[in-house]
Amino acid sequence: MILRKGGIQMKVKLADRTGAAAAILIGSASIAEAIRLFPYRMAMLNGDHLFPFVVGSGLLVFGLILAFRGDRSAGNHPEAGKDTESSPRTPVLIFAVPVILLFYIALIQWTGYLMATLAASVILFKGIGLFRWYSSLAAALILTVSLYLIFVQWLHAPLPSGRWLL
């Protein structure tokens, strides 16, 4: 599909259309599940139907946007259309991230949620984000505290306390 914008032709790439189709299908399935769960609700704004509806609606809307508009950020980049080589760090990150997550799973039972999340977050922020150590630590602290407040304090989700009772 070719769109015209200011005399410039922009193609909606096959990858955009494929991703859009997947998002629309998954979003529609999620909304269908929300409709199925709607009779079991406790109230309009809480219950098992709400999360699938919100996620499905987001996927549906952004899938439609992607289907008709495509990825416009690539067209504004000076080297758009050129093949770019991946970073030499990419193969290392492909294997390091799952290893770090497995480390996190093992560590969470021993140290508890807070310490394991903080440690894994610092490593991931430093490794993937290329932040400095102090920036990685600050971002990991903010992430850990935020997730703790959301899941433990607000949603009352039981998370492992570990041997350190954290």
Image (spheres, grey):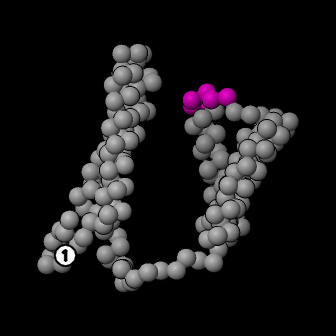
Place of residue 166 in the rendered image (x, y in percent of width and height, measured from the top left): 78, 38
Q: Is residue 19 above or below residue 73?
A: above
Q: Is residue 73 above or below residue 44?
A: below
* Crowdedness near tag 1: few (<14), some (14–19) or many (≥20) residues, C-alpha within 10 Å: few
Horizontal side of residue 91 vs 109, given as left or right:
left
Secondary structure under tag 1 reads strand
**Which residue is situated farthest in the right direction here?**
163
**Residues in magenta, as a range:** 153-158
Q: Is residue 79 above or below residue 92?
A: below
Q: Who is closer to the viewer here, 139 or 47?
A: 47
Which amino acid is tagged 1? Gln
Horizontal side of residue 55 vs 126, given as left or right:
left
Residue 155 lies in the magenta stretch: yes
| Residue 135 appears in the picture as rendered | no
Residue 89, picture quadrant: bottom right
Q: Which residue shows up at 55% across the image and 76% down it? A: 86
Place of residue 144 in the rendered image (x, y in percent of width and height, measured from the top left): 65, 47
Horizontal side of residue 66 vs 8, given as left or right:
right
Q: Which residue shows up at 75% across the image and 53% down it? A: 119
Residue 94, picture quadrant: bottom right
Residue 35 lies in the magenta stretch: no
Kindly report the secondary structure that dominates the magenta region of the rendered protein.
Answer: loop
Place of residue 31 in the rendered image (x, y in percent of width and height, measured from the top left): 34, 33
Place of residue 46 in the rendered image (x, y in percent of width and height, measured from the top left): 43, 24
Q: Which residue shows up at 61% across the image and 50% down it? A: 143
Q: Quadrant location of the N terminus?
A: bottom left
Q: Which residue is mark 1?
A: 9
